[in-house]
Amino acid sequence: MLRHSFVEELRKLENSLLEMGNQVKEMLEKSKNALLERDENLAKKVIEMDDIVDKYNWDIEDKCLKLLALQQPMAHDLRVIAAAMKIISDIERMGDYCVDIAKFTIELIKMPPLPTNENLIKMFQLVEKILCDSLEAFVNRDINFIISVVEQDDAIDRTYYKIYDEIVEEIEHAPETAPQQIRLLMIAKFLERVADHVTNVAERIYYMETGELKELHE
């Protein structure tokens, strides 16, 4: 494979990765709206969209392997391919968590509604932002994202623990709401896990540009 052809294929690979990330970003937004609007059809749409994410995962992995086989990339190009293979795995898992949120939303719709948990809405917004920032960091090769991602992830964790405390208190005062509250807590946990996978993406972006590995999870 000629160098210019390799560069073009690498560009296509990166574009596919961004498309995959944007698909998950849309799934996350739709899962939030499905929960807030108690929209079962929208929740089912999120579940259906996961097939598209899975296809991106397999297609991008195949492209990575072909690039490795057809031309022995050096230094930075090799790191881009290696990072891409890791990043798509994290994005795929984010999509899975969006599906989990949608499934719990469908269950919640069949139960008596509860007042909106404002911290859960805040958590959705924080996770949406950190995911968007990670995609922008990939496009811009922004190694400083690894600094901001830690702060954002900490804010998400703090919000999760607030939700946890609120839900425990609500169950104590109104035990009959436990089935709904437990599902809301699980949704918050899925959001927290999405953010954890975004920190993995930040690690890979940093590695891609510097060749150094940084471990963000304690």
Image (spheres, rainbow, N blue to C red):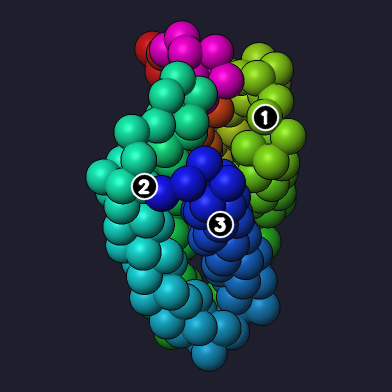
- Mark carried by residue 100: none
- Under circle 2, the secondary element is helix
Image point 50% across, 24% down: which residue? Answer: 76
Q: Which residue is disc 3 drawn over? A: 12
Q: Residue 200 sits in which quadrant?
A: top left
Measure the C-alpha gap from mark 2 to mark 3: 11 Å
- Using the image, determine if residue 147 lies above or below residue 21: above
Q: Which element carries disc 3, helix, strand or loop?
A: helix
Marks 1 and 3, the one that precedes in the sequence? 3
Quick check: can you spot residue 190? no
Residue that mark 2 sits on: 67
Q: Is residue 58 left or right of residue 114?
A: left
Amino acid at circle 3: Lys
Q: Amino acid at mark 1?
A: Arg
Which stretch is magenta?
A: 206-213
* On screen, residue 5 above or below 84: below
- The quarter holding residue 42 reads bottom right
Q: Amino acid at mark 2?
A: Leu
Q: Is residue 198 left or right of residue 143?
A: left
Looking at the rendered image, the disc whose residue lies closer to the viewer, 1 or 2, is 2
Q: Position of residue 41 (x, y in %)?
A: 53, 90
Quarter of the image where one finds residue 19: bottom right
Residue located beneath label 1 in the image: 141
